[in-house]
Amino acid sequence: MADRPVPVKDLKLLDIKLGQLPGWLASRNYSPMGFVNGYRRGYNRFYSKYIDVKKGGIGGIAMLLTGYVLISYIWNYDHIKHERWRRYH
């Protein structure tokens, strides 16, 4: 018995084909609550895959710390760039 077709709006981004992309983007919820729900789903997926496991390693926490370091560097880049060109004498 063949699998039933899944609606495009229920597919993940990696599961859609290029021709289905406009329909998938049109079915997304772009309200502030939609963004909050999308962030929450992503966080829950990350947490259940890397943090909440029986035999966990350092991979999930290392990814979080690396992301934090990269974001803080991007936020402070202007200050770091100007600090680099100052002369101390």
Image (cartoon, rainbow, N blue to C red):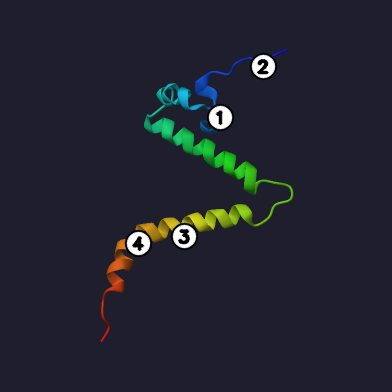
Query: Residue at position x 73%, y 47% from top?
Result: 54
In the picture provided, is 43 more to the left or to the right than 51?
Answer: left
Q: Are marks 4 and 1 in contact (CB under 8 Å)?
A: no
Residue 58, placed above or below residue 80: above
Q: Residues within 10 Å of mark 3 (few under 14, many from 20)?
A: few
| Snapshot quadrant of residue 62 | bottom right
Provide the residue designation for mark 4. 76
Mark 1 residue type: Asp
Q: Nearer the viewer, residue 49 or 4?
A: 4
Provide the residue designation for mark 2. 3
Mark 2 residue type: Asp
Provide the residue designation for mark 3. 69
Going by the picture, which residue comes out furthest to the bottom?
89
Q: SS for tag 3? A: helix
Residue 34, placed above or below residue 7: below
Provide the residue designation for mark 1. 15
Q: Nearer the viewer, mark 4 or mark 1?
A: 1
Q: Are marks 3 and 2 in contact (CB under 8 Å)?
A: no
Query: Residue at position x 47%, y 56% from top?
Result: 68
**Among numbered discs 1 and 3, the one appearing first in the sequence:** 1
Q: Nearer the viewer, mark 1 or mark 3?
A: 1
